[in-house]
Image (cartoon, grey):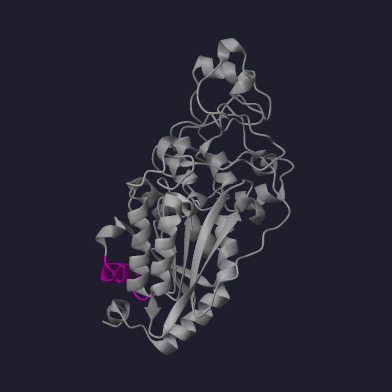
Amino acid sequence: MRPLRVLDLFAGAGGFSAGFFAESGYEIVGAVEQDDAAGRTFQVNHPETPTLLADIRNLGSEEILDLADGPIDVLLAGPPCQGFSMKGRRDPSHESTALLMECARLIAELEPSSFLIENVPGLLSFRRGFVIDSFFRRLNALRVGHLSYGVTLETLDAAGFGVPQHRKRIFISGVLGECLTFPDPSSSRIPLVDAIGDLPEWTTEPNEVVPMPKGHPLTQYQLARRRGAAGLYNHSAKRLRELRQARLSHLKQGDDRRALPDHLQAGGHEGKYRRLRSSRPSPTLVAHMAKDTSDFIHPYYERMLTVREAARIQSFDDRYRFVGSQYQQFRQIGNSVPPLLAHALAKSLELPARRAAKRLQLGGRTSSSRRAATA
């Protein structure tokens, strides 16, 4: 049985692909990412996947099919969400809307047998639902021969899929001839200490590699993340000035800036200077960590989380190496799809995607994707 051919658009650092790569029924045949640092991280960790550093608005189906060396079975996409996020300005002029619609264009041109798109829940209410409604209308209107996509949407919390983090995201799926049944979450949750408790208090430079420290006893999650790692990568944290160090020393687990004494008070939103609870999953990691990690103070140590700890919380294996500056590394992690959540989706999608690929084979591709694939 041949592997399903996967294309990853807006691939970022490769979290979506990492989850699908872990399932043997898939082959990642191409990735497109505009950001240089994220694209280089993808290439370092997925050297077997042809990767194009480009804006998808400038790409047509022929270029993408040349990159993938053939037609696409599964299209993955995690278009930028900054314009839709409830924590952002929700700017109607943000390019997020245009890039979301580019996904619909490329689905129409590439004619995959199935697709899976990730974004923030704020998309559902953005512009009073006009954007998501327009997007669904475009997807529901697509036809490949006599087949249409069964388009469905589900909100999933990564904490229900083995990720030590509460992270709610929407997933929009489309399968030719049927609808995807999304995976059911588990009732168990992984606490933060079980995810990062074996990592040392000391930190490194952003691109320094050091021997992996011993940890006894290791939790099942820690063992799974350590497996195959040649060393400890990216264990760097933001440096703290004296005032910030003094603030951290006053905070207990679960505290934030409101618990600080008057002479150490800090401005900012509620929850700033938040010391994480070791006994619970982490709150949602965000790309803003690139600028400020003060919402993510280590539960035990007088510092913020390191890049590697953030990667652990996103469920990346320790062998996954992030390149670029510390700023770029935090940004890549905050923007990623957690690989363990992606893996759960990959397992649920495989059989429907195979049935859809068979239908497509019988029905035949009708657009430029078939012409490019057979040229």
> Main SS of the magenta segment?
helix
Residue 317 shows in the view? no
Is residue 64 one of those drawn in magenta?
A: yes
- Residue 52 highlighted magenta (yes or no): no
Question: What residue appears at the point 63 percent right and 27 percent down from the top-left corner?
Answer: 301
Question: Where residue 319 sits in the image (x, y, percent)?
Answer: 53, 50
Residue 70 vs 264, above or below: the answer is: below
Image check: 53 left or right of 156? Answer: left
Residue positioned 49% across, 51% down in the render = 120
Given residues 251 and 126, the one toward you in this image is 126
Q: Position of residue 94 (x, y in %)?
A: 34, 46
Q: Quadrant of the C terminus?
A: bottom left
Q: From the viewer's perspective, is 282 left or right of 233?
A: right
Query: Closest to the observer: 198 or 139?
Result: 139
Region of the chain picked out in magenta, as a range: 60-71
Q: Quadrant of residue 361?
A: bottom left
